[in-house]
Image: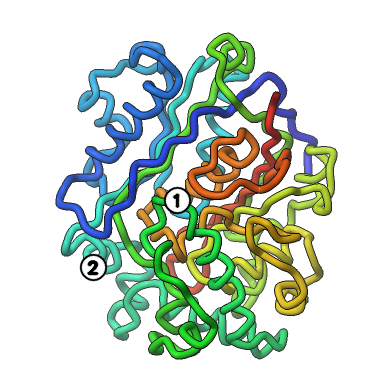
Amino acid sequence: MTRARDYAGVAVACPVTVPYQRRSERPAHWFVGRALRGLLDSAGLEKSEVDGLAVSSFTLAPDTTIALTEHFDMSPRWIEWLPNGGASGVMALRRAARAVQDGDASIVACIGADTAGTTSFADLVRNFSDFSRTAVYPYGAAGPNGSFALITDNYMRRFGAVREDFGRVALAQRDNAAANPNALLGRKPLTMADYLAAPPVAEPIHLLDCVMPCAGAEAFLVMDAYRARALGLPHAAIRGSIERHNAFFDEPVAERGGWAMDRGHLYRQAGVGPSEIDCLETYDDYPVITLMQIEDLGFCAKGQAPEFVRSRSLTVDGDFPLNTCGGQLSCGQAGAAGGFLPVVEALRQVTGQPLGAAVPDARLALASGYGMVTYDRCLASGAVILEGVT
């Protein structure tokens, strides 16, 4: 890989969460607008000072970022539209950072937001992609459950994972969510017996392996580090980041993501190794994908994540804090905002601004994303290492 520039001089600040709602008849535009308002209030900025806007949403259609500039009376110099699901948060951060470094924008608002009306999820599933509409939906396997059931089943057969291994992820995240007022399931205790007794959805996936669709938004600002200091904002530096699309496309069933290709570059750029990461925030639409990220990001070898989660404590106060806000499995999946959740939570932890419990002395956080399952696997993957700046 060609050696990429570092991200010197760039600050990530102002983690904002628009509270999640199980259902909402408000449009996605409302949630984007609430997130933007939250960013401005958090930073003490005027709207005219934000000259970059990066947005990801599944339910904003037919509008994209360009339409939002008119909705919100903005005139930015730089915009980005990122309909890439679970990798969109990392992608937005990377693109915004380069825009700031290159002088194309001075302050970029990065926002992931979606609504969840009575028909929005069904409409999304029906028209998610040409592959899903023509090659999956006609066979009655609508939505991602069928695809991830195949991935989960293959992973269990190949590497000896059992349902209890996935349950350990779900239970730890529910424990983490108990302190997070934004986690829709945070007040519902979960036992292994509850997890194992959940009804099947698409074997071997059961109900508590699946995220709950909801409405909400996640957002952050990217700006010059000098500006962040002048504003007195707690912020993070980007130590390293990677992105890869359609990785390992020749695998009959997905067993790896793009992180496995590029993690060496990630850690070299950051100047740290996996053992120095204080918390890991993964994209967790299904527990098997979290196990894949643990492996592919180098915390253990391929196929060893089941044993890894058996031997480690994944709670905020444990020896391997994972998805410290509860992740999507306990917070809910607010559409494309789910792809921003790992980045926002990583930023919260290293800047001392968690919504729930704080990882003690967290300095380095790794956030990863995985998104756009069009047929049998997700196409986009990315990761970023953030360091809190004092």
| SS category of the residue bearing label 2 | helix
Q: Residue at x 63, y 11 (%)?
A: 226
Q: Nearer the viewer, residue 205 or 330?
A: 330
Up-down: is 261 above or below 88?
A: below
Residue 207 pos. (x, y %): 40, 80
Q: Is residue 57 left or right of residue 174?
A: left
Relative height, residue 171 to residue 336 (above, below)? below
Asked which colour scheme the image uses, the reply is rainbow
Q: Is residue 266 above or below residue 72?
A: below
Q: Amino acid under label 1?
A: Asn
* Residue named by callout 2: 122
Mark nearest the camera among 1 and 2 is 2
Q: Classify 10 Å Cα crowding around label 1: few (below 14), some (14-19), many (20 and above).
A: many
Say which amino acid is labelled 2: Ala
297 sits left or right of 95 in the view: right
* Mark 1, residue position: 84
**Contact (Cβ within 8 Å) of mark 1 with mark 2:** no
Q: Which of the labelled discs sits on residue 130, or is there none?
A: none
Label 1: element kind: loop
Q: Work out how far the residue at label 1 is from the one at label 2, CA to CA, in angstroms.
A: 18 Å
Count numbered badges in the picture. 2
The percent coordinates of residue 168 (x first, y second) are 61, 76
Quarter of the image containing the N terminus? top right
- Could you tell which of marks 1 and 2 lies nearer the N-terminus? 1
The crowd level at tag 2 (other Cα within 10 Å; few <14, some 14-19, many 20+) is: few
Q: Does residue 209 show up?
A: yes
**Residue 88 visible in rendering:** no
Residue furthest to the top in view is 230
Asked whether, in this view, residue 270 is left or right of residue 36, the answer is right
